[in-house]
Image (spheres, rainbow, N blue to C red):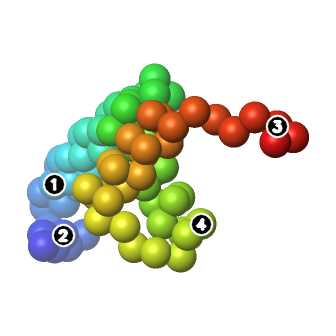
């Protein structure tokens, strides 16, 4: 951690440098977060699968392993939907 002293003759320059580096770091973090949000908006398949997995675990009250969940999802896709009223 860098410490600055307002009594130092180079304080103004050092403080400006510190502020510039903080802005650069913030911009980098903002860019990463924006990219993640954009992936979610575009329907990132991995994110959607992870979300469905967690949602199913919470609904069923069971901690499914990834392979168990994949098998559940495969079975849902391969089984025909029940006909209403039967």
Q: Which residue is mark 2?
A: 4
Q: Earlier in the sequence, mark 1 or mark 2?
A: 2
Q: Position of residue 67 (x, y in %)?
A: 26, 56
Residue 74 vertical placement versus 9 (above, below):
above
Residue 59: give its label. 4
Q: Would you identify the image quadrant in which residue 24 lies?
A: top left
Mark 1 lies on a secondary structure that is helix
Residue 14: give its label. 1
Find the distance from the CA under tag 4 to the CA under tag 1.
Answer: 54 Å
Q: Would you identify the image quadrant in which residue 29 lies?
A: top left
Disc 1 to disc 2: CB gap under 8 Å: yes
Q: Looking at the image, which residue is at 59% across and 66% down?
A: 59
Residue 71: give its label. none
- Closer to us: mark 3 or mark 2? 3
Mark 4 lies on a secondary structure that is helix
Mark 2 lies on a secondary structure that is loop
The C terminus: image quadrant: top right
Q: Which residue is mark 3?
A: 84
Q: Which residue is nearer to you in this view: 14 or 86?
A: 86
The reply to whether residue 40 is in sight is no
Q: Position of residue 76 (x, y in %)?
A: 49, 42
């Amino acid at each position: 951690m860098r410490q600055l002293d307002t009594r130092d003759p180079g304080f103004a320059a050092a403080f400006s440098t510190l502020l510039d580096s903080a802005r650069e770091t913030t911009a980098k973090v903002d860019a990463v977060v924006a990219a993640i949000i954009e992936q979610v908006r575009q329907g990132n398949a991995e994110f959607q699968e992870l979300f469905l997995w967690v949602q199913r675990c919470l609904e069923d009250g069971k901690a499914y392993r990834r392979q168990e969940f994949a098998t559940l999802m495969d079975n849902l896709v391969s089984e025909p939907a029940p006909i209403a009223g039967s």
